[in-house]
């Protein structure tokens, strides 16, 4: 017999290596960031904090050279679950106290309230349905969207619709407030219920209308460091920045109120 | 047709034929095969173990679940019908008719396969949304809007499922060859009769396989649906949307709902097992 050719065997091994090597890599990198020596923290924040926390993260990186802040924005409920599930993160900021409570097991310190928000009704800048005020959503021709009641923004919207005895139903229940705003700014809905801060961030792409009883349904934003944090000092420093005068000013400019 | 190439042709003892004579399966194949099998099977087993079975029947009876299940079944079956009616002619066109731009069209048909479903939803919105290119024309002409309706769900599902169907059927059409079509033509059959009486019956296994693939893709559709059609109980909320929503509220309920969807899928696969699960 001719000697066995080794090459096909090595080739056959390639896919195995391709599969196994990254796996081995995953196991090692999970506990020490990206391993380049720079420190980094990950902040899980409610979708409605996207603008302000991006700004604050940049400030934090300027104040702490060599530190990188990673931000993950999502529905508060999803983030709280990820935190409890042990997601590699250092700080959690949610859009209501209920979701923060649901993450209690993962909190390294008691959550502190840092901002409040109220709900407004927004319409696309072109106002295709010709809305003049909140009461117009009673018109069955008006297509409006809100968050799912499982998300904090949906809970508030649902309560407000009940407080105002609205009988028409939303066309869709979006998974988070960003999706609601997107439906409105893209003209796919005549109206939507978003936080005041979202309306401020959307600037001239939307027109806002006050919602009666909105002051009765104020959402409070708590923040807390997480037990799985690898760098508790940095995590606490970020929480302090949010609570500081600088942080409060950034939040105020975006339309948040003080708790 | 060329003789089927066989990987064993270099073996001197091929005449023996029995698998036993090929020796032990090499570890270099067995280990990755076991890994692949474990990756596919273990999460399903753990889902079964994690399901709170005590509340299974109670969950099945809730309004939200019944609505979502009804809508999922309705949407996936309508999607299959849409694929059969629209996808079969397209597959035939791609396999049998030589026209300029055929390869471009075939590539375009395959694009939704690799498109992230959310992108598919955004694309559909730009075309058929209230302010989309076609959607705004439709709205101006008739006052009808597509988003937030069950029709939108079916359109989204058909968009993502059609490529699976078309590629499966086109493959079957090519495999069965054009010879029988030519024979039918020489016997006087026109092209429609040939398609109906000769081409389609020959491609039937491919049509079935494509229909099952399209149905399965539709059953799990989430991203394009929630982006384009929205999410409202009874009209646009399918099982995957409901599962995602419940995952935010109560993960235990989400596990039960996932189990329900798994049971339904397995039920249909079991019904088709003679065609699908047994090796050819």
Image: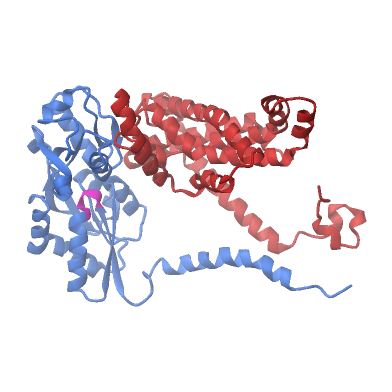
Chain colours: A blue, B red
The boundaries of the magenta stretch are A46-50
The x, y position of residue B212, in whole percent, is 59, 34
Q: Main secondary structure of the magenta part?
A: helix
* Quadrant that contains the N terminus of chain A: bottom right
Q: Residue B67's image quarter?
A: top left
Does residue B148 appear in the picture of this structure? no
Estimate the x, y position of residue A200 in percent, counting from the top left.
Answer: 13, 48
Q: Is residue A49 magenta?
A: yes
Left or right position of A47 against A197: right
Is residue A117 toward the left or the right of residue B202 in the image? Answer: left
Which of the two residues, B116 or A177, is positioned nearer the viewer here? B116
**Residue A19: within the magenta?**
no
Residue drawn where x is 7% and y is 62% of the image: A245
Residue at figure coordinates x 49%, y 43% from the top left: B47
Return the x and y of residue A243 as percentages of the image width and height.
Answer: 12, 60
Q: Is residue A173 left or right of residue B266?
A: left
């Amino acid at each position: 017999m001719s000697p066995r050719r080794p090459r096909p065997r090595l080739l056959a091994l390639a896919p195995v290596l391709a599969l196994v090597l990254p796996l081995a890599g995953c196991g090692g990198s999970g506990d020490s960031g990206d391993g380049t020596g720079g420190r980094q923290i990950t902040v899980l924040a409610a979708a409605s904090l996207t603008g302000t926390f991006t700004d604050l993260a940049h400030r934090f990186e300027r104040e702490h050279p060599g530190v990188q802040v990673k931000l993950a924005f999502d529905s508060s409920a999803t983030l709280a679950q990820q935190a409890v599930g042990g997601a590699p993160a250092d700080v959690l900021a949610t859009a209501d106290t209920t979701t923060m409570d649901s993450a209690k097991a993962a909190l390294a310190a008691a959550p502190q309230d840092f901002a409040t928000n109220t709900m407004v009704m927004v319409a696309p800048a072109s106002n295709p349905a010709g809305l003049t005020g909140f009461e117009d959503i009673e018109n069955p021709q008006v297509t409006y969207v809100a968050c799912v009641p499982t998300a904090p923004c949906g809970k508030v919207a649902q309560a407000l619709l009940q407080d105002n005895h609205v009988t028409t139903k939303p066309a869709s229940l979006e998974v988070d407030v960003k999706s609601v705003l997107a439906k409105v700014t893209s003209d796919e809905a005549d109206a939507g219920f978003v936080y005041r801060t979202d309306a401020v961030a959307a600037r001239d792409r939307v027109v806002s209308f006050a919602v009666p009883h909105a002051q009765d349904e104020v959402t409070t934003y708590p923040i807390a460091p997480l037990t799985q944090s690898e760098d508790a000092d940095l995590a606490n420093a970020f929480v302090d920045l949010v609570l500081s005068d600088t942080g409060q000013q950034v939040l105020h400019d975006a339309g948040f109120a003080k708790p | 047709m060329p003789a089927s190439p066989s990987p064993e042709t270099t073996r001197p003892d091929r005449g023996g034929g029995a698998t036993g004579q090929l020796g032990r399966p090499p570890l270099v194949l067995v280990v990755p095969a076991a890994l692949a099998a474990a990756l596919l099977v273990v999460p399903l087993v753990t889902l079964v173990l994690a399901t709170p079975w005590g509340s299974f029947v109670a969950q099945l009876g809730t309004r939200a679940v019944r609505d979502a299940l009804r809508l999922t079944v309705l949407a996936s079956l309508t999607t299959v019908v849409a694929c059969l009616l629209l996808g079969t002619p397209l597959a035939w066109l791609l396999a049998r008719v030589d026209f300029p731009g055929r390869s471009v069209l075939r590539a375009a048909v395959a694009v939704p396969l690799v498109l992230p479903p959310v992108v598919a939803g955004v694309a559909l919105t730009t075309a058929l949304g209230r302010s989309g290119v076609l959607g705004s024309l439709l709205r101006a002409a008739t006052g009808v809007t597509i988003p937030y309706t069950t029709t939108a769900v079916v359109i989204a599902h058909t968009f993502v499922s059609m490529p699976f169907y078309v590629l499966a059927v086109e493959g079957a059409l090519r495999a069965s060859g054009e010879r029988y079509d030519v024979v039918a033509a020489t016997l006087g059959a026109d092209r429609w009769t040939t398609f109906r009486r000769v081409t389609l019956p020959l491609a039937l296994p491919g049509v079935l396989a494509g229909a099952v693939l399209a149905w399965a893709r539709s059953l799990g559709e989430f991203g394009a649906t929630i982006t384009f059609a929205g999410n409202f109980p009874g009209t646009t909320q399918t099982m995957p949307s409901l599962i995602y929503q419940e995952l935010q509220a109560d993960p235990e309920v989400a596990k039960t709902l996932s189990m329900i969807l798994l049971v339904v899928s397995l039920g249909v696969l079991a019904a088709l097992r003679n065609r699908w699960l047994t090796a050819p």
